[in-house]
Image: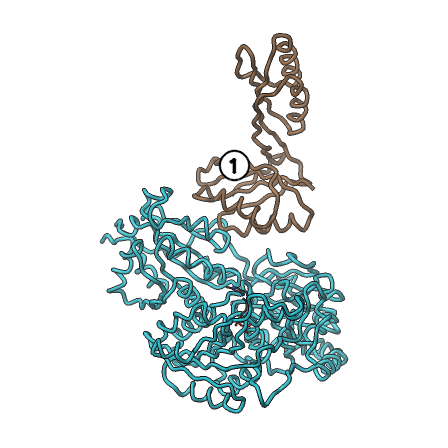
Amino acid sequence: MKKTGSQILLECLQQEGVEKVFGYPGGAVINIYDDLFESPIQHILNRHEQAAVHAADGYARATGYVGVVIATSGPGATNTVTGIATAYMDSIPMVIISGQVPTPLIGNDAFQEADMVGITRPCTKHNYLVQDIKDLPRVIKEAFYIARTGRPGPVLIDLPKDIQVATLKYTYPDTVKLRGYKPTVTGNKRQIDKAAKMLLRAKRPVFYVGGGTVQSNASGELLALAERLQVPVTTTLMAMAAFPQAHPLALGMLGMHGTYFANMAVTDCDLLVAVGARFDDRVTGRIDAFASKAKVIHIDIDPTSIKKNVAVDLPIVGDIKNVLGALLDNLADQDEAVSESVSGLQDWHETVSHWKASHPMGYQASTSVIKPQYVIEKVRELTDDDAIISTEVGQHQMWTAQFFRFSQPRTFLTSGGLGTMGFGLPAALGAQVAFPDRQVIDISGDGSFQMNSQELATLVQYRLPVKIVILNNNFLGMVRQWQQLFFEKRYSQTCMELPIDFVKLAEAYGATGLRTDKVDEVGAVITKALETPGPVIMEFKVAREENVLPMVPAGKGIHEMVLAS
Amino acid sequence: MKHTISVLVENEFGVLSRISGLFSGRGFNIESLSVAPTLDPDTSRMTIVTRGDDRILEQINKQLNKLISTIKVVDFTGEEFVERELALIKVATESESRAEVLRIVDIFRAKVVDVTARSYTVEITGAPAKVDALLELLRPMGIKEIVRSGPVVLGRGMKGVAG
Ligand SMILES: Cc1ncc(C[n+]2csc(CCOP(=O)(O)OP(=O)(O)O)c2C)c(N)n1
């Protein structure tokens, strides 16, 4: 039987196991929305296309599945770009369907036409303009395959309106044939042997773990390997939840706002094993001072990440789970060598303990004013271990990474690469759609929250009980911090002159709002929010000029930190 | 250092912009680029001349390979290869210089492919250095217009690069 393009699209999505999509309708996708009316696929109507993409992104980060978005042509499609770029920078699997004007009108500056293939070329893993209905099933198959395999990423399918109504008798292909796309999953055995030898020989080894470990679901292997060899583990912002932060081997985050002991360990180590991490400038600081005494092993599924920023002694291209598994296998029958190596690390562990004791992570507590770090510690204390935490971008994001001792993978959703304010609320929404029964909390600043606050409507409409913590300093705090430290306190355009009544804002949408400025009420407010059904905003009036420390000033090595006094 | 790279790509919508966008987006330089389909109409072959140190070339190579539309990348630097470029040169000719132009064309085994009373259009094929040399000699005669194809290359010997 012949089906229309839009029917084919929805059927193929089901074939891919898609149950939920996020989106926003419009003229160029009206046929798809008409068919959605009868489809078993559930559509979440966000209130902005950017938020729809972040929601699909949050869904993907929390589950590991491909997030799916539908947006109309022109402004609907261009609104998705920030969301797509956010997902691209963090390697999140996603398929975005954008409507397009009918093929005969393409290039005519037609109403609501935008060249989406052109606009998204640099921020998608791949993209398609479907010009013939016969290509549609293959394109969808390929899009999902490309999005979730290799180094994952967003794939956009631009679907003209006439293709949506054209008809075709089709079968969904079972396989893809892509001559130019064959990611290397299995690590080279000889390289893995060498890596095992280097690890066994090292006297001051460190694992430097990034988001690739999360994408590859390799937290189990990482923990097993770190414990087997007793190697300290530092994690990037993207990987804070990939390794239990309360573990004795955990060093916490490294880099610009990393812990003293993580940055010192990396500076002093003799072997740095990068695991699905890409030597981002926020991690390395001044590059020639970064791990300058170390041999470097770099494990990554994307060959372009290797040797891009730093020289590497031993590259291993492959999937993290696969490579770490192979390393564990390699070490399985080497008990003697392993215990010898472990006992050789005693000095190193002592040095690290000394660093940890001399400069622990901390902040100046207060009984008179709420410290933002305190709120984060309280949220940790009062939530479940599997609670999913998202953040926006700014100081609150860094404090969450520093103080929320994550313990389970895929429980920390944050925009690392692009640093997108407005990400956290819709990402939390997407995670809650995936896990209706888990606690999902967006930790936000007052600035970021206003970048996608319209999503309160979506939360209320779909009864998604996301809890929102607003650490209200009435500043664009992170930028203010830079102005304080590097621009003589000239607070240009970072003071949010107008105080917003977030409680009333919550109520306007039919959500609950709570507020306090008293230290001793913080716990009670969090508890009350967690007990209240539906979405809740908790507004905490926090110390206004608190800074994120340690901090590595721009251009300095990561051992040259400004420390908390 | 100068590198000449062949890239086999899917002959599909937008592929040229994927390649050129990759170069501009990452700050790599393109000195010349030529592209046309191969025997297989689904495959195009590009020849790109670029410059960079080893680290940049390694990135160019890897980034090209990372594109889904790229089937194969070969950097000919350090290999034996044949390199040819085509140029068409329109030379203004006054009566006294016409014979001189023809003599130069002859020495270079170039060809005159279009003639008017006041101009010759010369076609030359050869290594880029040969094209440069001819241009140098014709320049004093008054070159009105020129187009160069950019070099194309094939490796020497039996071995072929196929998709
Ligand atoms: C979309 C976007 N615009 C601008 C920035 C630059 N920026 C980074 S942090 C920040 C301040 C964030 O303020 P707020 O959300 O209140 O969080 P705080 O730092 O106070 O915790 C700004 C403006 C950004 N990251 N994203």
Which colour represents chain B? brown
* Secondary structure at numbered mark 1: strand
Q: How is the image coloured?
A: by chain
Query: Where residue B76 appears, x then y in whole percent?
Result: 64, 40
Q: Is residue A332 above or below residue A77?
A: below
Q: Residue at x 56, y 14 (%)?
A: B119
Residue A515 spot, x, y in % from top left? 45, 84
Q: Quadrant of the N terminus of chain A?
A: bottom left
**Residue type beneath disc 1:** Val
Q: Is residue A70 left or right of residue B156?
A: left
Q: Which residue is mark 1?
A: B35
Which chain's residue wears label 1?
Answer: B
Residue that appears at 70% across and 58% down: A311
| Res A398 quadrant in image | bottom right
A336 w.r.t. A15: above or below: below
Quick check: A305 above or below B100? below
Q: Is residue A405 visible to us here? A: no
Q: Is residue A155 left or right of residue B95?
A: left
Colour representing chain A: cyan
- Across and down, in percent, residue A465 comes to 38, 79
Q: Dot 1: few (<14), some (14–19), or many (≥20) neighbours within 10 Å? A: some
B120 shown above or below B19: above
- Left or right: residue A184 versus residue A355 is left
> Does the beta carbon of the residue at mark 1 sit less than 8 Å from ligand 1?
no
Residue A472 in view, yes or no: yes
Percent of width and height locating residue B62? 59, 51
Residue A13 sits in which quadrant? bottom left
Please name whichever residue, A37 or A337, is drawn nearer the observer in this view of the structure.
A37
Is B119 in front, or is B37? Answer: B119
